[in-house]
Image (tube, rainbow, N blue to C red):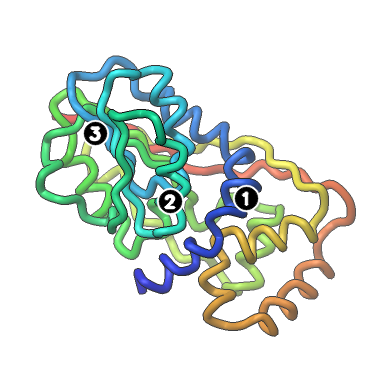
Amino acid sequence: MNEHLARGWDEAAAGYEQYFVPRFRPWVETAVAQLGDLPSGPILVPCCGTFPELDLLLERFPDREIVGIDLSAGMVRLARERAAGHDQVSVVEGDAATLDPRWLRACSAVVSVFGLQQLPAPEQAIDSWYDALLPGGRLSVVYWPSVTEADGPFSLMRELLRPGPADPDPDLAAVLGEAVDEPVAFPITYADAGSFFEAYAHSGPMRATAIARGEAFVEELRERFLERAPEGEWTHHPAARLITATGR
């Protein structure tokens, strides 16, 4: 399963960086803004993707060790390009679902944006990330829940790919004990429904499915999507979840 997911993101990496990273910037800014004053120690970014958090982290914590982790070799390559010239920054190709024991109670912060929902056991992952914090360290995680909006391209795509009621989301904040879990919504605009579909299918989270099911499936899905999508520019306001907690 992990290899299949990694291949999808390997192929999607460049397009994701170009198309989705700028649109997801407000959520990245929100996640980094939650960190406040941190104890001494490295900052860990599991599921870092192309590492859009890095520039903001370097602005606030220029002298900290910052480590990104991602399963996709394609994402890691772009993340390392972003980190070039910063000796205190490194990017590890690996599974962020369960952190290496060397991170146990060693980090001043753990930040992750839009990676948690892709992991097979998000409760275990966020528990592992929380256990990496030093006392007073900060966890800041943004992820997409199963339902992000009542109407929009994300909801239409989910309906076409997985008809019926969405699976209930696990109570991830409860896993951590004292944590804050709140919705965070921002507008995203696409030139039209066709450009969104192309990006979502080939440079986004549907890429692994497209590889597995083939281009004929993608084309049939595209036709169904465009039949129900509005014409012209499309703006929606999807709500992610933001979980924050302080290490004990």
Q: Position of residue 36 (x, y in %)?
A: 33, 17
Indicate the secondary structure of the residue bearing disc 1: loop
At a point 29% along the width and 15% down the height, the residue shown is 37
The quarter of the picture where residue 35 lies is top left
Residue beneath label 3, please? 178
- Dot 1 or dot 3: first in sequence order is 1
Q: Position of residue 232 (x, y in %)?
A: 89, 51
112 shown above or below 230: above
Crowdedness of circle 2 by 10 Å Cα count: few (<14), some, many (20+)?
some
- Dot 1 or dot 2: first in sequence order is 2
Indicate the secondary structure of the residue bearing disc 2: helix
The residue lying furthest to the right in this view is 231
Q: Which mark is residue 77?
A: 2
| Mark 2 residue type | Arg
Quadrant placement of the C terminus: top left
The residues bearing labels 1 and 3 have C-alpha atoms spaced at a distance of 27 Å
Quadrant placement of the N terminus: bottom left
The quarter of the picture where residue 137 lies is top left
